[in-house]
Image (spheres, grey):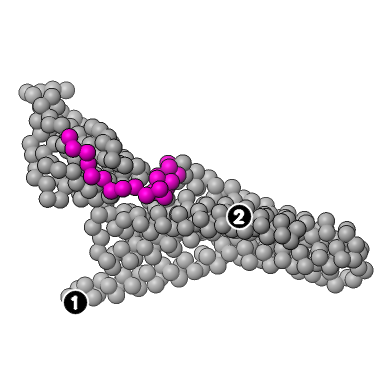
Amino acid sequence: MVCGGRSRYNVVDLRGRVREKESCMNPVEWYYARENKQVGPVSSLELKRLATAGQLRPEDLVWREGMTEWSLASNVRGLFDGEAKPADSGLKIGEPAGAASAAAEPLAAAAPPPTAAPQAPRRHLFDALLDWLRPRLDAQRIASKAKVFRACGSYGLLAAIGLTAAFAIILVAKTGQLDHLVWGARSLVLWAVLQYVAGKSCDAIDRLGRDGGGRMASATLPDCLALTSLAAGAAALLGAVAWAIATAYYPIILFGVLTFVVLGYLAAIALNPTMLGVAVAAEVRATDEALGVLNFLARAMLRLVPVAFGAGVICGAVLLAFACGQAFSGAEGVRLAADTAEVARRCLKWFGALPLAAYLLFLLYCLLIDLCRGVLSLSGRRE
């Protein structure tokens, strides 16, 4: 409501009490430039939302009334480090570093942004690719895919129990050697134990993944990791297809496909560093950034574990099924089936144990990080 030319709005404090405040300020309107294109005006709240969603990057240019020239978005206090203050429509972004403050004027009298085209940094082709992928690989989709792969790993180990029993029986029938039953029995017990341990470890990993912390000065490392992962995944897929054609061993294509999926998932995680609890801030001390980078890498690998677990178990189960079919191809087929089953067994064993190993290693990492922070804190106090 309007009272004496002043706009009145309500603000809810942390205790749920509503208190009224008055403001004489008109909404601040911002313009931003990306790829040499000027966009705007947008409100402070919308500008903050764009920065949070990754649609506005620290190296993009911004301008608002009262500024004499365009400035890097990373120079705007509160835009990327979450220190924004409440204002007209929800948030007020701070003044750019070095920019003079100016009293707000009525919207009709607001000065337009500089007419000269902003000298935005040239965008690399890979930057455009990552910008196109980022909104299509949001945190919600990433989390849903992890649940699917975790379920595939759990049910894959159950399927491996049945396939191992069937394969052992086939080998006994083909060779008449009862030693294969002993191999099958040991494998059955191992798959059952790993299925239980992996499920509990994935629950613990999910709980640890909700906590986060750390800051980085830019998104350079996440973007480079995302691009490298995509390139490595594509190379693995093409290499597996070429190898399968050259050797006529077509199950190898499955390894290429699942490797591409796992590395693609890692790229999706890297494009969403906020889901790891790592923020991109304009000003970060070198020691804090070092800890933030380590934190980002460790948590990205931790988030990758359920997907790698599911992909590896799927490979092992499919190879076991393939070995069962090979065993019906004569004496040579039995020998090849035994080799394939051994590869499948190793795959199931190592990837089935991966969640527990990752959980223990991440706990050790957390202890070391806390130790480093304690040492840095003591060093800072002495200085």
Horizontally, residue 82 falls left or right of residue 212, namely left
Give the number of marks.
2
Q: Is residue 246 above or below residue 377?
A: above
- Residue 221 appears in the picture as rendered: yes
Q: Identify the residue position indicated by label 1 in the image.
A: 382
Q: Which one is nearer the viewer's eye here, 358 or 270? A: 270
Which element type, helix, strand or loop, lies under badge 1? helix
Q: Residue, x 19% and y 77% (percent of image)?
A: 382
Q: Which one is nearer the viewer's eye here, 11 or 110? A: 110
Percent coordinates x, y for residue 64 in the rendering: 17, 38
Among the 4 quarters of the image, the one containing residue 48: top left
**Viewport quadrant of the N terminus:** top left
Q: Identify the residue position indicated by label 2 in the image.
A: 237
Check disc 1 and give the amino acid type: Arg
Among the 4 quarters of the image, the one containing residue 338: bottom right
Check disc 2 and give the amino acid type: Leu
Horizontally, residue 156 falls left or right of residue 231, namely right
Q: Residue, x 35% and y 57% (percent of image)?
A: 220
Mark 1 is surrounded, within 10 Å at the Cα level, by few (under 14), some (14 to 19) or many (20 or more) other residues, namely few
Q: Residue, x 6% and y 23% (percent of image)?
A: 4
State the CA–CA distance, disc 1 to disc 2. 54 Å
> What segment is highlighted magenta in the picture?
115-135
